[in-house]
Structures are given as C-alpha cells and as structure tokens.
Image (cartoon, grey):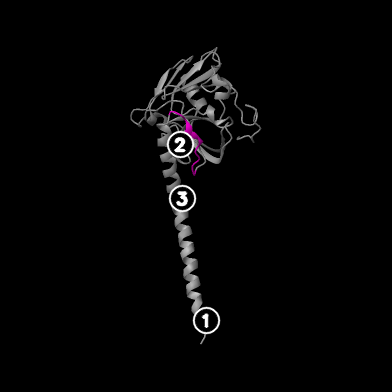
C-alpha cells in the first residue's frame, strides 16, 4: 500500500511551514532595531575604553565606526551639560541642554561620509542651526572663523564664518530620530552636512568666534581644512548635500 500523504493531507503541513517562516521573518524585522541599537551601544562602550582606536575598525548594523582621540571621554547628563559661546561676540553665553531644545529645531536627512571610506546613507540629524546661535551672540567685526572644542579634552575643529552660517550646519541634538547617545558624540555634537564627518565634532562643549581659521585635530595631522565631500582629501566620493 502507498502510505504517502495525498495533496490534501500535505497542504496543512505546507501552510504551517510557510507561516512559521513568515513568523520568524517578522520577528527578525521587529527585533532588528533593538539588535542594531544593542550592537551600537556595545561597540560604543568598547570604543570609549579603547585608547588604541582599533574598535573604530569594527562595523556595526548602523554602518558607523566609533572614533575617539582620547583614552576615555566623560559622560555628560542633561543636567550637567553646558555649551559656551564666546570669542569675538557681543553677547557671550552659556546654553544648557534644555536651552538648546527650546530653540527652533531643523531636521535634515543626508548621507554621512567618512574620509576613511565608509558611508551611511539617509541619516536624519536634528538640532539648532549654528547660524542662529551666532546671530544670538552677535558676531563682532573682524570675525572670520569659528572654532569648536569638545569635552573629551582633545578634539577641536574650525569652519570659516561663511561655512558656519550655512543652513546645513547644525548644533545637533538628535540623530536617527532619537537623542544623541554618548558613543555618537552626545548629548550635543556639531553636524556639517556637506563635509567629511571629521568636521562634525563629537561631544561639543565650546563655540568660539575667531579672527582666523585654526586647524583642528586631524588637520594638524594632514587632513584638509576645507573638507568638502568629493572635493578634498584626494577623494572623489559623491557629495552628501
């Protein structure tokens, strides 16, 4: 006797298999953001304790690498974070995180391009336009540039005043539609959309208006001061903005 199941008998088994596969797929999709976030947080924590910078070579689900030029970076809570604005301005000021959140926010979505080659497409950033902070401070005659310092105690960057006033330069509070994590330079970082990512200084703590551009950390080591994506550092990447 032929004991093989008929087509009718086999149909429920096929449906169960398909539904099981679909269920697993749905669970994977639903869990992907949590897995990615966990991987990012884990690699970020490792990078924060890695003076060699080798963890920056490791990819994660979001495509970012983690770089720090300091052996460790202190964390700033919303309560103790401060951003100072000074130099050639009429009204020096200090912003808390609450102060920055209360200002008009601009959201933009651009690719992030690192000078080392990796790229993260369609990354949302949100924050206060740097031009609005400069206008509130009252830039004095003779000012030509803006210098940025960071609470890691080591990193710095600069832009010309014209570059700093571009509408696609933010004092960023959010990335990927959530608050900036410590690993990504939070609670506040600079975001310079059309330039390589080293210009977007992490852990931003100071904005100083100056009479000339002062090369930042990586520029002292040979990177271009004007870091337009695709038009600097000997690279021909597609522009990000």
What's the CA distance linking mark 1 and mark 2? 58 Å
Quarter of the rendering containing residue 187: top left
Which SS type dominates the magenta stretch? loop
Which numbered disc, 1 or 2, marks the residue that appears first in the sequence?
1
Q: What residue is pinned by disc 1?
A: 6
- Residue 70, compared with residue 21, is above or below; it is above
Q: Comparing marks 1 and 3, which lies closer to the viewer?
A: 1
Q: Would you name the residue on which mark 3 appears?
A: 32
The mark that comes first in sequence, 2 or 3, is: 3
Location of mark 2 (residue): 174
CA separation in Å, label 2 and label 3:
20 Å
Q: Residue at x 46, y 60 (%)?
A: 24
Q: Quadrant of the C terminus?
A: top right
Q: Nearer the viewer, residue 107 or 175?
A: 175
- Whole-percent x and y of residue 214? 54, 16
Q: Is residue 58 magenta?
A: yes
> Is residue 85 on the magenta stretch?
no
What kind of element bears circle 3?
A: helix
Q: Is residue 167 left or right of residue 48?
A: right
- Quadrant of the rendered image containing residue 230: top right
- Mark 1: give few (<14), some (14-19) or many (20+) Cα within 10 Å: few
Mark 1 near mark 3, Cβ–Cβ under 8 Å?
no
Q: Nearer the viewer, mark 2 or mark 3?
A: 3
The part of the chain drawn in magenta is 51-61
Mark 1 or mark 3: name the one nearer the start of the chain.
1
Question: What residue lies at 41% left-to-right and 32% top-to-bottom?
Answer: 48
């Amino acid at each position: 006797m032929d004991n093989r199941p008929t087509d009718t008998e086999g149909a429920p088994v096929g449906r169960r298999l398909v539904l099981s596969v679909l269920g697993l797929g749905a669970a994977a999709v639903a869990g992907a953001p949590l897995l990615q976030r966990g991987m990012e947080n884990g690699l970020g924590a490792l990078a924060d304790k890695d003076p060699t910078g080798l963890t920056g070579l490791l990819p994660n689900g979001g495509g970012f690498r983690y770089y720090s030029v300091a052996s460790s970076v202190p964390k700033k809570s919303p309560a103790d974070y401060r951003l100072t604005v000074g130099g050639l301005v009429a009204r020096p000021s200090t912003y808390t995180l609450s102060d920055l959140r209360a200002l008009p926010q601009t959201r933009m979505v651009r690719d992030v391009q690192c000078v080392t080659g990796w790229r993260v497409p369609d990354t949302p950033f949100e924050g206060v336009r740097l031009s609005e902070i400069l206008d509130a401070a009252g830039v004095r005659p003779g000012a030509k540039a803006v210098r940025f310092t960071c609470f890691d105690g080591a990193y710095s960057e600069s832009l010309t005043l014209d570059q700093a006033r571009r509408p696609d330069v933010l004092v960023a509070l959010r990335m990927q539609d959530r608050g900036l994590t410590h690993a990504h330079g939070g609670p506040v970082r600079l975001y310079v959309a059309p330039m390589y990512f080293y210009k977007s200084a992490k852990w931003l703590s100071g904005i100083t208006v100056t009479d000339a551009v002062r090369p930042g950390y990586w520029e002292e080591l040979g990177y271009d001061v004007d870091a337009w994506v695709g038009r600097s550092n000997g690279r021909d990447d597609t522009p990000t903005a």
